[in-house]
Every structure is written in C-alpha cells, then in structure tokens.
Image (tube, coloured by chain):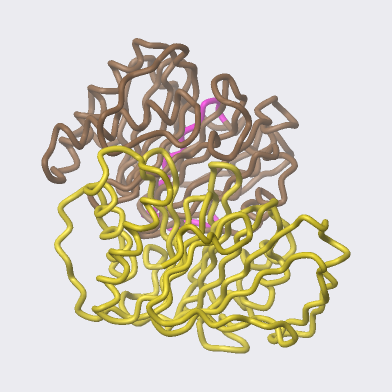
Chain colours: A brown, B yellow
Amino acid sequence: MCQLLGMNCNVPTDICFSFEGFAKRGGETDEHKDGWGISFFEGKGCRTFMDVQPSAHSVVSDLVKRYPIHSMNVIAHIRKASVGAVKLENTHPFNRELWGEYWVFAHNGDLFGYDPILTGCYRPVGTTDSERAFCVILEHLRARFTERPPIEKICSAIREKAQEIAQEGTFNFLLSNGEIMIAHCSTELHYLIRQHPFDTAVLKDLDVTVDFQQVTTPSDCVAVIATEPLTENETWIKIEPGQCMVFRNGSVAECYKD
Amino acid sequence: MCQLLGMNCNVPTDICFSFEGFAKRGGETDEHKDGWGISFFEGKGCRTFMDVQPSAHSVVSDLVKRYPIHSMNVIAHIRKASVGAVKLENTHPFNRELWGEYWVFAHNGDLFGYDPILTGCYRPVGTTDSERAFCVILEHLRARFTERPPIEKICSAIREKAQEIAQEGTFNFLLSNGEIMIAHCSTELHYLIRQHPFDTAVLKDLDVTVDFQQVTTPSDCVAVIATEPLTENETWIKIEPGQCMVFRNGSVAECYKD
C-alpha cells in the first residue's frame, strides 16, 4: 500500500511541516520506499517533484522540505509498489490536462485485475492500476460533458465514477484541479482543518513542533488530508469508507456533500 | 525571446555541464530571467523541474546543477517573456500525454496574433503562444492518425505542421517523446554531436571545463542542441532556418531527414 497527503487552503501556504513528517514514512518510520511525488498548484500552473528513491533518502525531497512553496492545493504520495514496477512512470501523482486545467491524482490501494477498456483521449504511460483509474475518471468527464461544466457537476460525476471503480478493490485517492481537492476513502483517510485560533502541532515521525499561531493570520483556513494522521496532539477526523469529500478554500465544501 | 537546450543520447547521460552554462543565461550572462524549466525522460517516465525565478538564482536550478540525472532525452528552456505573463503556467517545457507517451515541448520565438481554434483534446492552461502551438501540433497528430503510427510518420506529420505554424512568426522549438528529439529552426538553433574520441569542452558562460573522455565510453553518442552554442572550443553546426531535424540515439536520424 501507499500513503497520501493533501493540503487545501484559502491562502497560499507551505506544506514543509507536514511533508517533513510524511517523507519519513518513505523508508524510515514506515516502508513506503518505492518512490514518492508531490504536486503544487501555483495559480493555474502546477509543478511536481518526484523521485524513485525513497522520500526519506532523496536529494529532491530534501529540497522540498527546506524550500517553502506556497500553494492552495498540494497532493503528495509515498509508494509501496503493488501493481507496476518501481519506475518513474509509475510514480504518483499523475497529471493530465482537461479543459485547459491541470488535474492531479494520487491513489492508495489495489485494483488488482482492474483492466477497463480505454477508448478516449487518455492512456496510461506506466503500468499501474492507479494511472489507469485516473484515465477512466477523466475519460468519464470528457464523455459526460461536451464542455467544462460548473465545478459542482464535475464533483458529482467524479464521485459517481469513484464509487464504481471502488467496487474493484481499494480506492483511496486525492484529486485536484487547483480549485478543489477531492478526497475519496475506501479504507483509510483522515483530515483536519486548522483555523483560528491556531495552536501548536507536534509531528509523530520526528521531533518537530510548530506553533501555527506564529505563521498564520486569523482568516487562514488549512485542510490537511492524510492516510494516517501526521501529528500526535491534534484531533484528526476519520473519513468514512465510501465517502467522497470535497475541500475548497481550506474547508469542507458543504454544497458538494454526499 | 528565450533560449533552448536539448540533449539526445544513446545511453543515459547527465546534462549538468551544459545546464550549468545554460542556466547562467537566465539572469546573469544574459537576460532570460522570466522563468525556466528542464524535463528529463527516464524510461517512459518524465519529470520536470521548473521555477518562475531566474535560472541563475533559483534554488531548484541549483539542485539540477549538482544532481546528475541520467537521461537519453532532455529539454530545457530559459524564458524572456513576450506573450503571456511570468507565471508557472506559462513556463516551458510543456507536457502532454498522447497514445500513452509523454510529449515535451519548448519554444523560442514569437507567434504574435496566432490564435487558432482548438477543437480537440488539448487546451492551453496558460496564455502563451507556445503552449497553444504545442496543442495544435498534438491535435494535428490525433486527427491525422486513429492510433499511434510508426515514429517516421509522426515525425513527418510534425514537420508538416511545424512548417505551417512557422508562417505565423518565429518557431524555433524542441519536442521529444523520450525516443526521438525533434529540433525545428526558424531563426537560431545549433547542434553538435559528441562521440569517440571525446575531448575537452570549455563553457562560454562560466569558467568550467570538462574532459569528456574521462566520463564516457567509446560507444557513447551525445547530441546537444542549443539556441546559442554553449562552449567556446567546439564546432557547433548551425541548423538552417526552415529545417526540421530528428535526433535519435545521439545522432541525426538520417531516415527522417527533410
């Protein structure tokens, strides 16, 4: 299996604190050492840092830990390979363009034997079940809508297809277009919202503490989503299996609720 | 305008030497300071490092300079913005998937007023003429072939469309799918092939020399393509305006010649 980390906020924020803890799980405090990646949306643009080396021992992840990139939507992934060899093309997150927006996807789980026929624009470059499922979702959106619809309709269509794919195995994922973050839980996924009054947070995987009150303003809202909680002193909410949540501006987007 | 740098080889090779000189032109020895990017193919996979900061002063480019990534196809770009603001989404190289392969593109030139109608799968995320032209090329390939044809046919189709787009302005570009590197010249583009017997190379933009004989084997072939020659002691060949060259395994691919 793998682990997921996502961040969605109402103001560009860096993820160095969370990523530092998360990256330890890629080869030190846990076994997800078959590559890692992190995608940052900056406006409409998106850049991804990735490596087949374990995140705990990667020169590239060292850069990400110490170089604060401010973003409103971030998806990160540490891999424990199940379907698909350890190669760059099998490293998440995956990125495709649809309707002039980048869509970024990362998956935790197994869809053994999931081999749908793809007849549209999107084909996997690698050999993972994850990338294939991502292509299926995008193909579904393109087939369903002739042009880019309002975001609520996109979310509904994604939710519908996610529930279908989830029948095939374990389908925890994060998906973002830089505007919203979709979090789908099959088995394990948690989240929390940090907002005023901010407090101190203590990482589980290494001895690092941050006082968020010192680095935020009272109007900031930051949602963090992770397979396994990253901090030991905060209350993480478990997302129920089968639930598909949408985050926007650092909060749960009520109008897109299941 | 901007500058391009490409490398195509028959064995995975690092580009640290060339990139070190090239990156100086993004804000120190030249004025291409409106962002930069570099894409490395590693097998079928591709990863891009990019920044809106000038390449001469970017923490990310510092990593690329000192972290040898071995690749058979690399495309890099340093930008001097003409069409499109300085934003991440306007930073080259651009990347799209077609027929289960990543295609990477970078452009030097201006296509002022070039505003073709795009009706297919690919839409620009940013506002550059460059990304738009890239979408046109990919849309042309998709419309022309119902499934992925042999690489010679892809090259012919790209050459045909490139000549058409070049009527609209200045269209120097590099385009690669990790197998071949296409170099199209409108105004300025040079190349050289390094092969046995290897020699010493001296960068123009900073005081760095490398003896390639120490770091290669006799069967290695490395093609380097650049807007402006990067070394002062080697013979660079000027690509003629209007010429579209294809490189494969570090050599000019004769069978795809104009």
Q: Is residue A132 left or right of residue A146?
A: right
Q: Position of residue B255 (x, y in %)?
A: 48, 57
Residue B139 on the magenta segment = no
Q: In terms of image quadrants, where is residue A243? A: top left
The quarter of the image holding the N terminus of chain A is top right
Q: Which residues are magenta?
A: A214-229
B132 and A104: which one is in front? B132
Up the image or down, B9 lies above or below B258; here it is above
Residue at 45%, 59% in the rendered image: B256
A217 part of magenta stretch: yes
Q: For the point 52% across and 40% down, which residue is it? A: A76
**In this picture, residue B3 sits left or right of residue A85:** left
Of the 4 image quadrants, the one containing the C terminus of chain A is top left
Going by the picture, which residue comes out furthest to the right? B214
Q: Position of residue A179 (x, y in %)?
A: 30, 48
Rendered location of residue B47, percent (x, y): 55, 51
Task: Report which quarter residue B63 is drawn in.
Answer: bottom right
Q: Residue furthest left?
A: A146
Q: Nearer the viewer, residue A73 or A97?
A: A97
Against A35, residue A69 (above or below) is below
Q: Nearer the viewer, residue B120 or A70?
A: B120
